[in-house]
Amino acid sequence: MSYEKVVQATNKVVGTKQTLKALEDEQVEEIIVAADADPKVIQKIIIQAEKHSVLLTKVDSMKKLGKACGIEVSAATVAIKK
């Protein structure tokens, strides 16, 4: 289900740095995080999502998440913007 949401989203940012920036700017409606991502990479995202009360959804695969974003590489996080 979340992969479909990512595919259909027209206003999204891909990657941890871009997601953190969007969170800081309070532009994020929901964050999708790949469960197989390195915990060190996604830990700050999870903490910031909780701090800003942003919905956080986990999916199983970085590879599938990247594909849902329309990129040829894996993605640890995607932020769906407001």
Image (tube, rainbow, N blue to C red):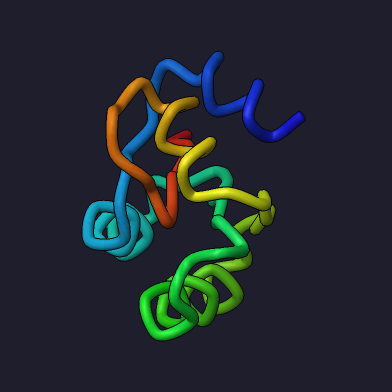
For residue 72, what is the image quadrant? top left
**Looking at the picture, how far across and down is residue 75, in whole percent?**
38, 48
Q: Position of residue 3 (x, y in %)?
A: 63, 30
Q: Residue shown at 37%/76% (left/top)?
A: 41
Examine the rendered structure and indicate whether residue 59 appears above or below residue 70.
below
Could you say which is closer to the camera, residue 39 or residue 5? 39
In this rendering, would 34 be left or right of 16?
right
For the residue pair 43 and 53, the one nearer the viewer reads as: 43
Split into 4 quadrants, where in the image is the N terminus?
A: top right
Tally of marks: 0
Q: Is residue 27 above or below residue 69?
A: below
In the rendering, at what x and y percent does residue 78 appear?
A: 43, 45
Q: With respect to residue 2, does 16 lie above or below?
A: below
Q: Residue at x 69, y 34 (%)?
A: 2
Relative height, residue 81 to residue 42 (above, below): above
**Residue in the picture at 41% in, 36% down:** 66
Residue at image position (33%, 55%) is 19
Q: Position of residue 74 (x, y in %)?
A: 36, 45
Instruction: Residue at the far right: name it.
Output: 1
